[in-house]
Amino acid sequence: MKIKDILSQGKPTLSFEVFPPKTEDKYESVERAATEIAKLNPSFMSVTYGAGGGTSRYTVDIASALHNQYHVNSLAHLTCVSSTREKVHTVLEALKEAGIENVLALRGDIPADGSVEKDYQYASQLIREIKEAGDFCIGAACYPEGHVESANKTIDIEYLKQKVEAGCDFVTTQMFFDNHVLYNYLYRIREKGVTVPVVAGIMPVTNVKQISRICQLSGTYLPQRFKAIADRFGDNPAAMKQAGIAYATEQIIDLIANGVNAIHVYSMNNPEVAAKIKNNLTGII
């Protein structure tokens, strides 16, 4: 089923993200984790795509297993900045063969050595090409706090408009920890005429090491309430896990109460965290 059709039903949805292994010897453990999360019967599951497309085969394999063996709607990520046009079309053909209808089109991070291919420069170019390549439902990323490479939030929203105009059907946000950041963002993009569904990306932070990496990569704003939780429970792994799940649950409940129905959890391949989030939302989703 296409994700745009799932989102159009107007009911709260809960989805989870998994990421493929970097090496083949880790494949079975990742597949087991994805299978356990699939048993939670999410609205859909997304499968990420490694830097430079290094795990593209695993992305297709896991997305295909979720779709064909476990009957979960799959969303396969596809990045382009380090991919040739030939590579992109090879992946798209593999997705078609697997029956995958949903693709999250991303530019992808610039590798540390700065090496990129020349066929694509922006996600909007990839979106346009996917649109022409088949009957895919196309998602894209959006950044409530602005992309770290954008000069300002206004320019960042212009890039978002270009993605929508190129043919994306919905967008998923980068993680955020203050819901007011999202509410303000939604107001701004709607004012600019962006009307596609927005899926809210939520990260349950279960250990303090995640926090420093989050800030380093994305510059995400951490509200004082969240910092207090990390300071108080950061040295106690069990307590931090429980507190992080509780914080994410409260975020989700507040989002749904305020009309943001689509929730996507960055579960970090952790079935226990995914299950606790799902159980906390019993009766709500």
Image: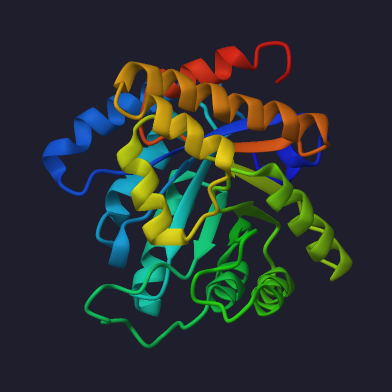
How is the protein colored in the picture? rainbow
177 shown above or below 221: above
Q: Position of residue 144 (x, y in %)?
A: 65, 58
148 shown above or below 26: below
Q: Quadrant of residue 147?
A: bottom right
Q: Nearer the viewer, residue 109 or 70?
A: 109
Can you say which quadrant of the picture contains the N terminus?
top right
88 shown above or below 72: below
Residue at 34% x, 37% y: name it: 208
Q: Nearer the viewer, residue 103 or 13?
A: 13
Residue at 85% x, 62% y: name it: 190
Horizontal side, residue 214 vs residue 185: left or right: left
Q: Position of residue 120 (x, y in %)?
A: 45, 82
Q: Position of residue 45 (x, y in %)?
A: 51, 36
Horizontal side, residue 104 vs residue 231: left or right: right
Query: Residue lying furthest bottom in this view?
Result: 118
Q: Position of residue 4 (x, y in %)?
A: 72, 47
Residue at 56% x, 79% y: name it: 125
Q: Quadrant of residue 151?
A: bottom right
Can you say which quadrant of the picture contains the C terminus?
top right
Query: Residue lying furthest left in this view?
Result: 25
Viewer can see residue 64: yes
